[in-house]
Amino acid sequence: QVQLKESGPGLVQPSQTLSLTCTVSGLSLTSKSVSWIRQPPGKGLEWMGVIWSNGGTDYNSAIKSRLSISRDTSKSQVFLKMNSLQTEDTAMYFCARIWRVFDYWGQGVMVTVSS
Amino acid sequence: EIVLTQSPTTMAASPGEKVTITCRASSSVSYMHWYQQKPGASPKPWIYDTSKLASGVPNRFSGSGSGTSYSLTISSMETEDTATYYCQQWSRNSPTFGAGTKLELK
């Protein structure tokens, strides 16, 4: 069955770079696309970006200058890197598979930006 | 970027009551999708392509709309429907979400 699982540091210092990994199973990254979506505590969902099945990427224009999404298809992993973190980047970070909708989601990883 | 405005922000419904949540888009979109999220859990796809129910979604739920106005309706509120519902559109490779509607039990 399809599963996605996010991993990464729970705490990042301001101005530092966040690196997260989404490990997938039950799906091929060369046939399905994966997005990153985040949710600040008590707030709504914000789409961050996508890596398409062909390896191309698209990003939310609001954070495009700070964000990079890549993948390693041999390891079934999708990566997120975002630099210059600020306290407002504190959020639960989810990866999700795309099929018409975001149909499978990981459990999320909570990232706190604090010194 | 297309902005989605949901209303109401919060509402309470009694068991058996009909519930309607609306989502208005700042520009016309082809489809609207809806997600259900309960506290501490990841969002779940609930309605896709405006009116298609995701797997396992009870048929008391329905979706409708076109252009800039869409809605999610529960024909008869049940306890398990308490959650936050988000609408979402995908236009020009830039998806956006509504701010959410928190549905509580009265």
Image (cartoon, coloured by chain):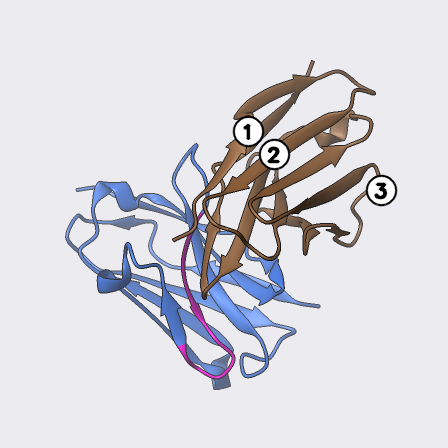
Chain colours: A blue, B brown
Q: Is residue A61 left or right of residue A77?
A: left
Which part of the image, by quadrant, shows the C terminus of chain A? top left
Image quadrant occupied by the N terminus of chain A: bottom right
Segment colored magenta: A46-56
The image quadrant that residue B92 belongs to is: bottom left
User: For mark 1, what is the residue?
Assistant: B7
Task: Please report contact status of discs 1 and 3: CB closer than 8 Å, yes or no.
Answer: no
Residue B55 percent coordinates (x, y): 78, 54
Choose between A84 and B20: the one closer to the eye: B20
**Mark 1 residue crowding within 10 angstroms, few (<14) / some (14–19) / many (20+):** some
Query: What's the residue type where badge 1 is placed?
Result: Ser
Residue A10 picture location, percent across and down: 34, 49
Relative image position of residue B33 (x, y in whole percent): 62, 51
Which amino acid type corresponds to the residue marked 3 in the rendered image?
Asn
- The residue located at (72%, 31%) in the rendering is B81
* Res A40 label: none
| Circles 1 and 2: CB atoms closer than 8 Å | yes
In the rendered image, residues at marks 1 and 3 fall on the same chain: yes
Q: Is residue B25 shown in magenta?
A: no
